[in-house]
Image (cartoon, rainbow, N blue to C red):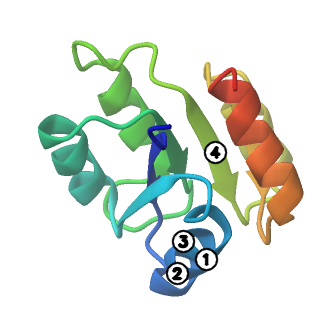
């Protein structure tokens, strides 16, 4: 069986490493440390799902999300927001922005995997 390919976009290298440890048994994993780096990967490689942090310098998660949705062929790409922010307005904006899930860090690994599998219809 071919593993589904996940791109995590998070400015924290530590968070990316933790995600890799959680996900690499079930999925093919790639990381990007900024919104711009994530967009470059999406332009050159196929991914089945994106895990997206909101709080990032230069280009935050919402700007990255908007840019992903404007790209041809990525309008329906499953995206799960994975962030440390608990600010009510950002949580509501995240949930209503057409993503497939919203998970607060530190993420419970079983919860995260179940959300990913649901978004991928596995």
> Regarding mark 3 in the picture, which secondary structure is present there?
helix
Pointer 3 residue: 20
Q: List x then y, in percent, for residue 17.
A: 52, 81
Mark 3 surroundings: few (<14), some (14-19) or many (≥20) residues within 10 A: some
Of label 4 and label 3, which has the lower sequence position?
A: 3
Q: CA distance from mark 1 to mark 3?
A: 4 Å
Q: Along the line of sight, which residue is nearer the eye, 4 or 43?
A: 4
Pointer 1 residue: 21
Of label 4 and label 1, which has the lower sequence position?
A: 1
Q: Are marks 4 and 3 in contact (CB under 8 Å)?
A: no
The vertical placement of 119 against 85, above or below, is: above
Residue mark closest to the camera, 4 vs 1: 1
In the picture, measured across the screen, residue 97 lies left or right of residue 1, that is right
Q: Residue placed farthest to the front in the image?
A: 1
Mark 2 surroundings: few (<14), some (14-19) or many (≥20) residues within 10 A: few
Q: Are marks 1 and 2 in contact (CB under 8 Å)?
A: yes
Mark number for residue 81?
4
Pointer 2 residue: 17
Q: CA distance from mark 4 to mark 1?
A: 18 Å
Q: Quadrant of residue 120?
A: top right
Q: CA distance from mark 1 to mark 2?
A: 6 Å
Q: CA distance from mark 2 to mark 3?
A: 5 Å
Q: List x then y, in percent, for residue 29.
A: 44, 59
Q: Is residue 89 visible?
A: no
Question: What residue sits 67% from the left and 69% below the top?
Answer: 22
Q: List x then y, in percent, for residue 58.
A: 31, 63
Question: What residue sits 54% from the left and 71% below the top?
Answer: 20
The vertical placement of 114 against 48, above or below, is: below
Mark 1 surroundings: few (<14), some (14-19) or many (≥20) residues within 10 A: few
């Amino acid at each position: 069986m071919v593993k589904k390919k996940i791109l995590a976009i998070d400015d924290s290298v530590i968070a990316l490493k933790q995600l890799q440890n959680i996900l690499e048994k079930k999925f093919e994993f790639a990381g990007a440390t900024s919104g711009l780096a994530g967009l470059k990967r999406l332009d050159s490689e196929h991914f089945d799902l994106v895990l997206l942090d909101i709080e990032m310098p230069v280009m935050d998660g919402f700007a990255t999300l908007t840019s992903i949705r404007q790209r041809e062929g990525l309008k329906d790409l499953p995206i799960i927001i994975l962030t440390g922010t608990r600010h009510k307005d950002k949580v509501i904006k995240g949930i209503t922005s057409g993503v497939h899930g919203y998970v607060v860090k530190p993420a419970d690994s079983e919860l995260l995997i179940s959300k990913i599998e649901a978004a991928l219809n596995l």
